[in-house]
């Protein structure tokens, strides 16, 4: 049986789905429900790419839900997310590209901080592709479940940019500095099974997109029905291993990507990617 949710639209491409009147044990609760889903919608752009207003809406939603629910599922319809909207960046005047990218980076950082400060587990349910900044959003979550056909991609070097959205931070924590450098220097697609082997994800599931999302939602229900105060304290203890360093790293990434976005390297990488050709690096 599919879950019934109360839906609230917070942006034209973002909605919140609260488990309808249930507390994760199938019993009524005075709150809207202890499980919610934050759903990214593609709108009229492919691959669930994002612009600053979408990011701000996502961050604000996570911040608001922190006081309402005990477990949050983040899901992208069709595709999880391929990161920032590169067409939006190309449309900006060349002299404004660094400002445009800095605005995106600032909004992305707000979302990542909101996820890490959310007291309960945040679960990414990934179908399609999670690439670039979208992969960073996945890695920022507490648990990651992938559809068996999903693909991950660090992507940034392919367009002549340094990594953002805490990708380098979480990759080093997950696979160590040597493998992290390999994945970032020479981006190649990573399938779902390899992602589990590398430690990026907890498990893979099959079925239709709807069945997959329901399976992950069931996992969220199980967590919401558990000792939520323990989950909150455990999350804090795990994060204490890098307390303070994530915020510093996000600022370092933001500085680096703003600097690189004003270079000929990025101009060529962006043009080549959007034109469907191989870049010609100097």
Image: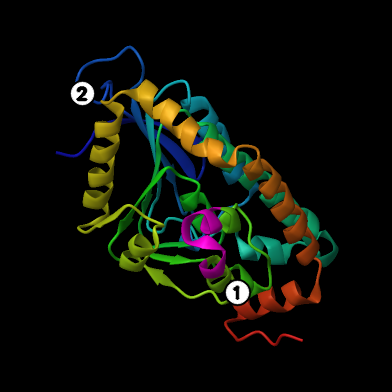
Residue 23 is covered by the magenta coloring: no
Please tell me which residue is depicted at 58% across the width and 69% down the height of the picture: 181
**Numbered range of the magenta stretch:** 170-179
Outermost top residue? 30
Instruction: Determine the CA span between mark 2 and mark 1.
Output: 46 Å
Specify the quadrant that holds the N terminus.
top left
Type of colouring: rainbow
- For mark 2, what is the residue? 25
- Report helix, strand or loop for mark 2: loop
Please tell me which residue is depicted at 27% across the width and 21% down the height of the picture: 23
When asked about the image quadrant of residue 21, the answer is: top left
Please tell me which residue is depicted at 63% across the width and 57% down the height of the picture: 164
Q: Position of residue 73 (x, y in %)?
A: 38, 40
- Closest to the camera, between mark 2 and mark 1, is 1
- For mark 1, what is the residue? 185
- Look at the picture and state if 17 lies above or below 134: above
Specify the quadrant that holds the C terminus.
bottom right
Q: Position of residue 50 (x, y in %)?
A: 57, 53
Residue 141 seen from this side: yes
Type of secondary structure dominating the magenta stretch: helix
- Report helix, strand or loop for mark 1: helix
Query: Mark 1 and mark 2 in contact (Cβ < 8 Å)?
Result: no
Q: Please state if 155 lies on the left or on the right of 149 as rendered.
A: right
Q: Position of residue 41 (x, y in %)?
A: 45, 49
Q: Earlier in the sequence, mark 2 or mark 1?
A: 2
Q: Please state if 64 lies on the left or on the right of 279 as rendered.
A: left
For this rendering, which residue is in front, 107 or 176? Answer: 176
Picture disc at residue 19: none
Q: Position of residue 94 (x, y in %)?
A: 81, 66
The 10 Å Cα crowd at callout 1, few under 14, some 14 to 19, many 20 or more, is some
């Amino acid at each position: 049986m599919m879950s019934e949710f109360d839906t609230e639209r917070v942006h034209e491409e973002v909605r919140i789905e609260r488990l309808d009147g249930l507390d994760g044990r199938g019993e009524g609760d005075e709150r809207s429900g202890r499980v919610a889903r934050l759903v990214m919608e593609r709108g009229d752009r492919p691959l669930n790419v994002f612009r600053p207003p979408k990011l701000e809406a996502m961050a604000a939603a996570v911040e608001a839900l922190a006081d309402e629910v005990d477990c949050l599922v983040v899901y992208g319809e069709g595709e999880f997310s391929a990161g920032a909207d590169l067409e939006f960046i190309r449309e900006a005047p060349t002299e404004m590209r660094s400002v445009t990218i800095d605005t995106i980076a600032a909004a992305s950082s707000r979302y990542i901080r909101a996820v890490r400060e959310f007291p309960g587990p945040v679960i990414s349910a990934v179908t399609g592709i999670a690439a670039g900044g979208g992969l960073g959003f996945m890695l920022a979550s507490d648990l990651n479940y992938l559809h068996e056909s999903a693909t991950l991609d660090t992507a940034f070097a392919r367009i002549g940019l340094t990594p953002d959205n805490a990708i380098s931070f979480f990759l080093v924590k997950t696979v160590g500095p040597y493998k992290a450098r390999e994945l970032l220097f020479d981006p190649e697609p990573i399938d779902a099974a390899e992602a589990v082997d590398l430690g990026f994800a907890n498990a893979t599931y099959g079925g239709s997109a709807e069945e997959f999302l329901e399976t992950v939602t069931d996992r969220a229900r199980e967590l919401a029905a558990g000792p939520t105060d323990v989950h909150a304290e455990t999350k804090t203890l795990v994060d204490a291993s890098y307390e303070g360093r994530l915020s510093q790293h996000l600022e370092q990434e933001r500085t680096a990507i703003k600097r690189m976005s004003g270079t000929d390297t990025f101009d060529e990488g962006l043009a080549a990617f959007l034109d469907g050709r191989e870049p010609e690096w100097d």
